[in-house]
Image (cartoon, grey):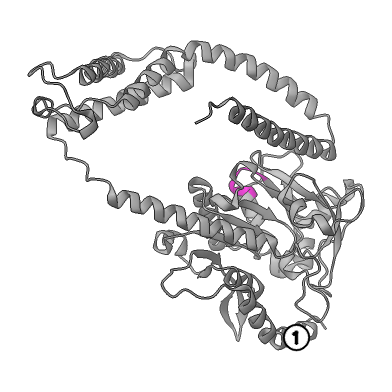
């Protein structure tokens, strides 16, 4: 019966292909052959067809990425690809979507009571045979891509499994099976998957104010609870949300249905880190490609907007690098001095971060620290002399023409600019003030421990409301601060 339903759905999708192509043409701007579109990496999922593995990606995702102005680059799920990700550069965005369950060993062990018994695992594998299988290669590829995005602020959109991968990459954990681990203690029962009606299945979610999701669906939200009905197809979900993320929506059973990083969300500046457990791309009216709500494609639209902005930022940075003069090569002695100074400032940083726990520096380390201190003093004096004139030939320097006296060149040392001098003084002050900083840190740790103890007694809903409140307060504070700064600024 399930095979027949799959076949009917496939026929319906094929019939709608031309309609989607027409819609894509309407979305797409007029083509500019001189412009290279940004690249969005999407990892394929594999299935068996005619006794062979076949890699595929859902066409809904591809349609939306292409329609809003980017090029999807499919990363095949084949052995060894996780070692070849550098070959897929440049990467302007990553979209991760459906797939098998994430390997529990990648997140399990940090939560009390987490995990399933052998009997429960057998029941899950029997009920969800295509999802409960672990695909280690896909896990490896997608986790490496997610971490690359987080390290380099590359726009990332995770749908369904893609949101779970993002949470795991940031230290969060998952329910191995929502029905076994959450449903018993949940305030309300929710059906997160319906094998008999993939696309038609819906369940409600509560959208939190002050989030991108609320902004996208504002005109469609129902009642004071800001409810929305969404399509979902999963049996796992976020158990413990990673600390950097803020929830955007909850199902009635308390499961997180959407989250994002507010510090990495500004599509116009190329910033976008988000995970959605539900499927906005599948939320379409029966027998049609028309979306349930106008906000359904917004996640893809804003994601691609961030991807385009990120590509433009990379292009601008590359242009500056090409225009910048080549750095002069250091002779052997200066290169040796440079390495000593790098080591010195690295030691100073470690002392600053570790404080009393680091203990006293060893004699060799103390000598390297002394070298850094001497460098600060010498370079500060050099900077002063550069402002007054050459101490050898007594000739004044022409700063407005960017000239340097030949004596300075012959001495094989370059004086610092005012900005560099200021930075060096700041570095010295940072190390000197380490003791005061550690005292303040201990005080803050006490306050944080008290706050954590209080929040541990709060419910999930109370915590999510609190997080939303402080996020809104932060935005208001930033706006008021900007107005005060602008009003205090002297008129030109």
Left or right, 40 with respect to 451, comes to left
User: Looking at the picture, how far across and down is residue 381, in whole percent?
Assistant: 24, 15
Question: Residue at (55%, 68%) from the top-left corner?
Answer: 69
User: Looking at the picture, how far across and down is residue 215, in whole percent?
Assistant: 75, 52
**Secondary structure at numbered mark 1:** helix
Q: Is residue 486 magenta?
A: no
Q: Which residues are magenta?
A: 167-172
Q: Nearer the viewer, residue 146 or 387?
A: 387
Q: Nearer the viewer, residue 109 or 260?
A: 260
Label 1 crowd bin: few (<14), some (14–19), many (20+), radius 10 Å: few
Report the residue marked by disc 1. Answer: 12
Q: Nearer the viewer, residue 373 or 78?
A: 373
Vertical side of 177 occupied by 446: above or below: above
User: Looking at the picture, how far across and down is residue 341, in whole percent?
Assistant: 27, 25
User: Looking at the picture, how far across and down is residue 489, in whole percent?
Assistant: 55, 27
Question: Residue at (61%, 79%) from the top-left corner?
Answer: 25
Vertical side of 481 occupied by 3: above or below: below
Left or right, 33 with respect to 371, comes to right
Q: Is residue 301 visible?
A: yes
């Amino acid at each position: 019966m399930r095979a027949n339903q799959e076949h009917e759905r496939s026929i319906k999708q094929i019939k709608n292909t031309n309609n989607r192509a027409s819609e894509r043409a309407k979305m797409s701007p007029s083509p500019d052959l001189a412009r290279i579109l940004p690249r969005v990496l999407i990892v394929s999922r594999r299935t068996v067809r005619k006794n062979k593995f076949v890699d595929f990606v859902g066409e809904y995702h591809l349609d939306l990425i292409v329609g809003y102005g980017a090029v999807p680059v499919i990363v095949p799920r084949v052995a060894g690809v996780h070692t070849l990700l550098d070959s897929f550069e440049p990467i302007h965005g990553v979209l991760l979507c459906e797939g098998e369950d994430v390997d529990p060993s990648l997140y399990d062990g940090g939560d009390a009571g987490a995990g399933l018994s052998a009997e429960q695992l057998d029941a899950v594998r029997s009920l969800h045979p295509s999802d409960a299988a672990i695909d280690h290669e896909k896990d490896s590829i997608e986790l490496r891509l997610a971490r690359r995005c987080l390290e380099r602020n590359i726009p990332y959109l995770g749908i369904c499994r893609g949101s779970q991968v993002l949470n795991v990459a940031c230290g969060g954990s998952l329910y191995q099976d929502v029905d076994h681990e959450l449903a018993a203690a949940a305030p309300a029962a929710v059906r997160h998957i319906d094998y008999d009606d993939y696309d038609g299945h819906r369940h409600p979610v509560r959208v939190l104010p002050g989030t991108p999701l609320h902004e996208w669906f504002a005109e469609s939200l129902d009642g004071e609870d800001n409810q929305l009905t969404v399509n979902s197809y999963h049996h796992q979900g976020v158990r413990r949300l990673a600390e950097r993320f803020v929830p955007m929506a909850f199902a009635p059973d308390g499961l997180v249905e959407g989250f994002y990083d507010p510090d990495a969300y500004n599509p116009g500046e190329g910033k976008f880190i988000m995970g959605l457990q539900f499927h906005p791309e599948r939320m379409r009216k029966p027998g049609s490609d028309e979306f349930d709500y106008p906000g359904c494609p917004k996640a893809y639209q804003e994601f691609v907007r961030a991807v385009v902005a990120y590509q433009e930022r990379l292009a601008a940075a590359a242009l500056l690098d090409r225009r910048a003069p080549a750095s002069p090569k250091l002779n052997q002695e200066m290169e040796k001095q440079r390495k000593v100074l790098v080591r010195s400032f690295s030691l100073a940083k470690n002392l600053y971060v570790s404080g009393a726990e680091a203990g006293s520096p060893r004699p060799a380390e103390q000598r390297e620290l002394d070298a850094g201190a001497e460098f600060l003093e010498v370079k500060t004096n050099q900077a002063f002399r550069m402002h007054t004139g050459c101490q050898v030939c007594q000739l004044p320097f022409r700063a407005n023409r960017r000239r340097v006296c030949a004596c300075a060149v012959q001495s094989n040392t370059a004086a610092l600019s005012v900005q560099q001098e200021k930075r060096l003084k700041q570095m010295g002050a940072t190390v000197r003030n380490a003791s005061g900083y550690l005292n303040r840190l201990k005080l803050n740790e006490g306050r944080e421990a008290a706050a954590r103890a209080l929040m541990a007694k709060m419910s999930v809903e109370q915590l999510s409301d609190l997080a939303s409140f402080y996020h809104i307060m932060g935005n208001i504070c930033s706006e008021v601060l900007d107005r005060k700064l602008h009003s205090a600024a002297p008129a030109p």
